[in-house]
Amino acid sequence: MGTGNQLLIAVLAVCAGAARAADVRAYKSAENTWSQAILAAVAANPGGSIELPVVDGHYLIDNRQGPLVITGFTGALRFDPGAKLVCQFPTRGCLVLAGGANARLENLRIAYLPVPVTRINEPAFNARNTYDLRVVGAVIENSPAAGILISASYRPLVTQSVILSSLADGISFENSEDGVVTDSTTNDTGDDGISFINYERSNQIEFPDLRGGLAANVKVRNSRARGIAVPGQSNVVVSNFVVENTSASGILVLQDTSFSTRQPVNVKFHNGLVIDAGRLAPAKATPYGVNYSGTGGLVEFSDITVVNPADRGLSGMAPGGRLSARNIYIVGGTDGVNIGRTRSVELSGITAEDSGGYGIFVNTGGNWVSAGNLRAVNVSRSSTLRRAVWFENNGDVQVRGVNVIDEQNNPTGYIVGGFRNGRIVMTGIQAMIRSGTVAFTCPESTPGARYFCDAEPF
């Protein structure tokens, strides 16, 4: 064999050795713990791949003095199916990744024994000050705080992961840049299912103003706070989501002054389903389907169905912000839509059905409203006001296309109009009222209020 071929074989052998994963069991002895063995494997392979095969009794982690902390890791931790970190003290966190770049955690499994009953501040898994972290296929059970908390990090990704029975948030990105969560589920969380939060604190090292976030193909079920929340984070897009059974709002964008968050700007939710928002005991404030509060710039909701909210279907107030809501279908609740003081409001393709009070109500506090293709079906079922679509205390209001439908034997919601607006023009008003006596009448026009009905109701 020639020297050239021998050299090639030698190079290939070196590369194969470098690529071979280290087995964490090789670092375990009778004298050390699994925590020490994992740290030893990381120290010996800081940028390599470390395998955690299935072992008898799982990987017991003695975390009474604090979580297992891995610093500056740039390699991969790979858990075989069935391999699991089991933390033995529910009063502390379990695993921390501090610093490092391009780390990858595959099939991370964390559980607690005994199961925590008291919420603490240390999550089961916390990554902080990391770059380009990838968490793939994690399953976190019974965390005493958040299941996964990623803080002050850049471009982290969580995908194909499941959080079960955490006492705080399921998956949370805190003061991080462009955090991404995809194809993941949270179930039975003590706080928000998924959150993007940006605290405004004087300590800019721990709480930097980092922006951006994305959630796609996610499901939140049984959240004892909000389903998907964006307190303070800007430039966030949430799409293809399902939120079911929450104690507070199903989805929420807000500046949370009680927790000193920044004001969110440019947040979009689209293509989602919200079921039973606010109906999980114990009840919390603002048990709405879709909610915004104190936002700046634009907040946008589109192509969302809200079913059976405990209170309003779509509601919010943002004196310095703009709302755009398109193709929202709401069934049940008190008011279908109830919009408070907001700098500008655009509504398009909004349907409110079977609400107890208003079908659609907008009161921006003197600001302008543009709306089209509004539909109210069997609304105002428990209100003597009978208001299906109503604009009050706005500036300029322009509405094109209003359809009021009441097919009940005794119609409840059949009044369209406004009060104390700067100027209102409402065109294309139609009504279909199924009753012996037609209840709907076209509103009378005045110099500042013009109403145009397409036809007599039937």
Image (cartoon, rainbow, N blue to C red):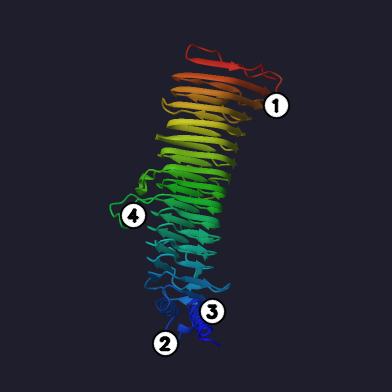
Q: Position of residue 421 (x, y in %)?
A: 45, 20
The crowding category of the residue bearing disc 1, from other C-alpha atoms within 10 Å (few below 14, some 14 to 19, many at least 20), is few
Q: Tell me the residue at 53%/25% (across/down).
A: 390
Q: Tell me the residue at 56%/73% (across/down).
A: 80
Q: Tell me the residue at 57%/19% (across/down).
A: 427
Residue labelled with disc 1 = 409
Task: Work out whether 15 lies above or below 300.
Answer: below
Q: Earlier in the sequence, mark 4 or mark 3?
A: 3
How far, Cα to Cα, is label 4 from label 3?
38 Å
Indicate the quadrant where residue 153 lies: bottom left
Q: Earlier in the sequence, mark 2 or mark 3?
A: 2
Q: Earlier in the sequence, mark 1 or mark 2?
A: 2
Q: Nearer the viewer, mark 3 or mark 1?
A: 3
Task: Name the kind of residue labelled 4 in the image.
Answer: Phe
Q: Is residue 377 left or right of residue 23?
A: right
- Residue 207's disc is 4
